[in-house]
Amino acid sequence: MAKRKIHFTLIILIFFLGLILRFFNLATMPPALNWDEVSHGYNAYSILKNGKDEWGQFMPLANFRAYGDYPLPVNLYITIPSISLFGLNEFGIRAPHAFMGALTILACFFLAQGIGFSVGISLLAALLVAISPWTLFPSRFVVQSNVSLFFITTGMALFFHRKKRAFFLPLAALALGISVYSYHNARIFVPLLIVALAFLYQDEWKRWWQKKRIYLIVAILLLLVFFVPLVPILLGSEGRARAHWVSIIDEGAINQIIEDRLQSNLPEFLTRLVYNRPTYFLTHFFINYLGYFSPRFLFFKGGTQYQFSVPGRGVLYPVEMPFFYLGLGFLVFWVLIKKKKFAQAVLLWLLLAPIPAALTRGGSHVIRASTILPLPQILSALGVFQLTLFIQKRKKTGQILLVAFLLTIFISFFSYLNAYFGSYRQDYSWSWQYGYKEVANYIQSHYNDYDKIFITKKYGEPHEFLLFYLKWDPEKYRSDPYLIRYFKTDWYWVDSFDKFVFVNDWEISGVRSQESGARSLLITSPGNYPEGWSKIKTIDFLDGSSAFEILER
C-alpha cells in the first residue's frame, strides 16, 4: 500500500513538472505566433462568434479551408473553450496544446503499464515524455500533432488495458477514431495500426464474440462511424490538397527524373527502368523511413525545420541512445524468440508509425513523425531498467546505473532548456514570423490616421495576423466589400480587406497613394520602398536584425 502511494505521488509530481514546463512563459515562447497558429485561432474565434469559419462554412467537421491546406477540425473545437476563457491571444490558443501535452505524460504511464512493463519503467517513460525535446517543444505551440498524439496514446493505453475492463475497448476505438480527425498523418497510420491489431489478436476477438460481444460490437460500430466517412473525404479534392503540398512526387521530383534521364549514359530502356516515378518514390521513401530510426535524427541533429526543434540538437537526449537501441533489441527478442503478443503489437506500431512521414518530401520532420511517440521514451526506459537488473543480479550495483542515467538526463535537460529559452528564442525569432504582433499594435494605435495601409506579403499571410491581433469581427470580414481573395497555385490568397492592401515584396516599388491628399502607411521589408516615403519606425527581430520598416506618405 505504501508503495502505491509512492508511485502515485511520483506520477503526480512528474505530471506537474510537465505541466509547469509547458505553461511557463507560454505566451512569449516560442517567440511569436506563426501563420498556422493564427489561422487556427482566428477560425476558432469565428466559430465561437457565429458558428462559421472565416470562409462562412458552418461548423466544419471533415476539415476547414484555412489557406487551402485544409487542416483537420478537432483542434478548432478544443481551442474554442480556451479562447472564450482567456481571450483571442497567444496563451488562449496555446493553452489547450500545453495541457494535452501534459496529459500525454499520464497517458504514456498507463500505456507502459498496459503493455505489461513495471511501474519503474512506466514512471521513467513518463518522466522522459515530460522533458523530451520531441514532446516538450511541440506542446508549447499550436500544432495538430499534439492532439493526435494524445488521442493515439490514450487509445492504445485503453486498448492494452482492455482485459482489466472490457469497456476500455470501445473507449479505445473512440479515442483512435477522434485521432484521425486531429492530424493528417493519423489518417494513414491509425487505420494501418487498427488492421494490424485486428489480425494480430484475431483469436482473442473470437473469444470476445462469445463472452463480451456487446463491447466488441460497440467498438466496431464506433470505428465504422469514424472511418467510413474518411473514404469520400480522402478521395475528394480537399482531402488530397495536403498530399499535393508534401508528397514525395511533386513537380520538382518530376523535373529531377527528366533531368536524370537526359544526363544518363545508359541505354534508353535501362534509363527508363532506373529513372522513373516508382523508382524515385521507393528510393526516397526508404531513405526517409530509415532516417527516422537513425542516431543523427534521434539523438544528435534532430529535425531540419527550425519551427519544430532546436537546431543541432536531437529530438531525444544523446544519453538515451544506447538504452533506446537496447530496449528495441529486447522488443525484437520478445517478438522473435518469446513470441510475445504485446511485443508484436508494440513493434508493429513502431514499424508502421514512420510511414506517413516517409511518404512526404523533406526528411527528418519532427512533427510528421510524431506517430512514433511515445515509444522511443518507453523503449529508452525499458533499456535502462533491463540493464540495471542485469547488473544488479551480478554485482548488486545496478541502481548506480539508474542514478547516473537520471543525473545525466537532467544535466542534458537543463542544457536544452537553456538553449530553448535563450539562444533559440533570440536567433530564430524570424522563423516564427516575429514582428506581426508589433505591426498590428502599431496599426491599432494609428488606424484612424491613414486612408490606406499597404503591407508586404514577404513573411506570409499578413491578413491573417491582422484578423487575429485586431480581433476583427468575422462577419464584418466576410461581408467586406473591399475583400479580395482568390484561389491560385493551390493556395487561397488575400489581396485586401477594409483599408488594408497586401502586396508582394517585389511589387512594393510600385505602391502609390490611391488619390490626391490621401494619407498612406507602408509596412515593408527593410530597405524596400519607393522614393517619397518617410520612415517612422523599424521593427526588429529578437537578434537585432530588421524585420519591418514602417513609412508614411
Image (cartoon, rainbow, N blue to C red):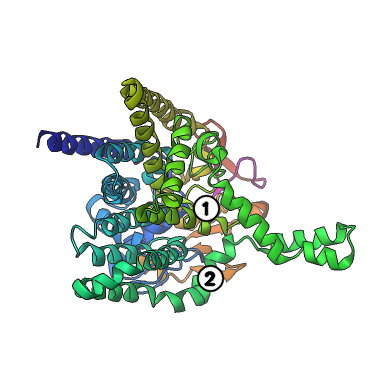
Which numbered disc, 2 or 1, marks the residue that appears first in the sequence?
2
Q: Is residue 433 left or right of residue 51?
A: right
The answer, for residue 120, to whether it is visible in the render is: yes
* x then y, percent, for residue 504: 62, 56
Vertical relation: 442 (above or below) 323: below
How far apart in space, not on screen, are marks 2 and 1 (Cα)? 45 Å
| Residue 395 against residue 370 in the figure, above or below | above
* Residue at screen point 45% across, 62% down: 189
Q: Which residues are magenta?
A: 522-531
Q: Position of residue 49 (x, y in %)?
A: 28, 65
Residue at x 39%, y 41% (from the top left corner): 377
**Residue type, numbered disc 1:** Arg
Disc 1: which residue: 519
The kind of residue tagged 2 is Arg
- Front residue of 123/542: it is 123
217, 127: nearer the viewer: 217
Q: Is residue 46 magenta-colored?
A: no
Q: Is residue 223 above or below residue 146?
A: below
What is the chief secondary structure element of the magenta stretch?
A: loop
Could you say where residue 529 lies in the image, as x and y percent from the top left?
A: 64, 46
Element assignment for label 2: helix
Q: Dot 2 corresponds to which residue?
A: 240
State the residue in front, 528 or 285: 285
